[in-house]
Image (tube, rainbow, N blue to C red):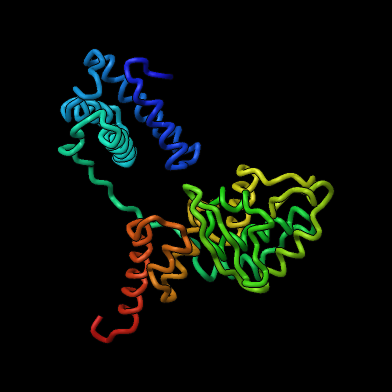
Amino acid sequence: MPIPQYPQLPAFLDYLKFEKRYSQHTLVSYQNDLEQFFAYLASQFDAPPVDKITAMYVRSWLAELKEEGISSKSINRKISSLRSFFKYQMKTGGLKQTPMTTVTAPRVSKRLPVFVAEKDMATLFAHVEFPDDWKGRTERLVLQLFYNTGMRLSELINLKESQLDPSHSQVKVLGKGNKERIIPISKELVSDLQQYIGEKPGSGAGVPNIFVTEKGKPLQPRTVYAFVKKQLGAVTTVEKKSPHILRHSFATHLMNNGADLNAVKELLGHSSLAATQVYTHNTIEKLKEVFKKAHPKA
């Protein structure tokens, strides 16, 4: 809901939408975080104007979130939303100083990304039988593209025929913030995709998306989640079985086989190395295993 006491909010959200070109999902997150903060200020401190908001108000809200059991990760996201909002106020001249300079974020314990073992991925494509129909062809090809490119779910289901470049064996992917990146793929996968596109059923021939259902309509996220979970369940016991696990597997297997960290960063479309470095931990764990098995003094 709009907060009448804070007319700066709509202008900030327009800035994120039209200048930063953030996705609708990200915009909603920012809006929810900031509306929660301003609603708290209205109920507890009689809605002080933006230039009167101090670090004390922010810390008070964060303390309440902590008492409510909100995770450190979620609190850090809300802190990030506030930092961006106050930074924008300084940029537009509404503030001389941000109240966020003395606000510290809670520590978040890093969880290593879950991934499917290389041998299990090999089993999936070599031995698991997919249905011998359009649905089965789609499932197999989607799984192959996820694992071969590390694409996000939204990137894959929105992938257009025009983004496939057969002559250079690559796909052009539109990622977060409409940032474009190029990912190489094998000639064999290019050939399979071209054949698939040429045989789209019914009205699917007129749909720009590469992947369509047997009725010729673009794939929906829920459908992809369901069949990815089912097919991975045939080869692995990892708890989470989702398209994002295939992204983790793509990155982890590259790192384990000696890929350059910066190259993996570019392939994943990460904005900084910090997000990619989590995959080095799995590489270190693998090195430790090799050391224990092979070194005479281990």
Quarter of the image where one finds residue 53: top left
Closer to the camera, 232 or 172?
Answer: 172
Q: How many marks?
A: 0
The one nearer the camera, 65 or 208, is 208
Q: Considering only vertical position in the picture, is 122 above or below 226?
A: below
Q: Furthest-front residue in view?
A: 93
Judged left or right of residue 63, residue 156 is right
- In the picture, measured across the screen, residue 263 lies left or right of residue 144, that is left
Q: Is residue 41 left or right of residue 231?
A: left
Q: Which residue appears at 72% of the width and 67% of the height?
A: 192
Q: Is 265 situated above or below 101? A: below
Residue 99 visible in this rendered orientation of the protein:
no
The residue drawn where x is 31% and y is 22% is 38
| Camera-side residue of 162 and 235 | 162
Which quarter of the image is occupied by the C terminus? bottom left
List x then y, in percent, for residue 235.
58, 62
In the rendered image, residue 197, in percent from the top left (x then y), is placed at 75, 59
Q: Residue at x 62, y 46 (%)?
A: 226
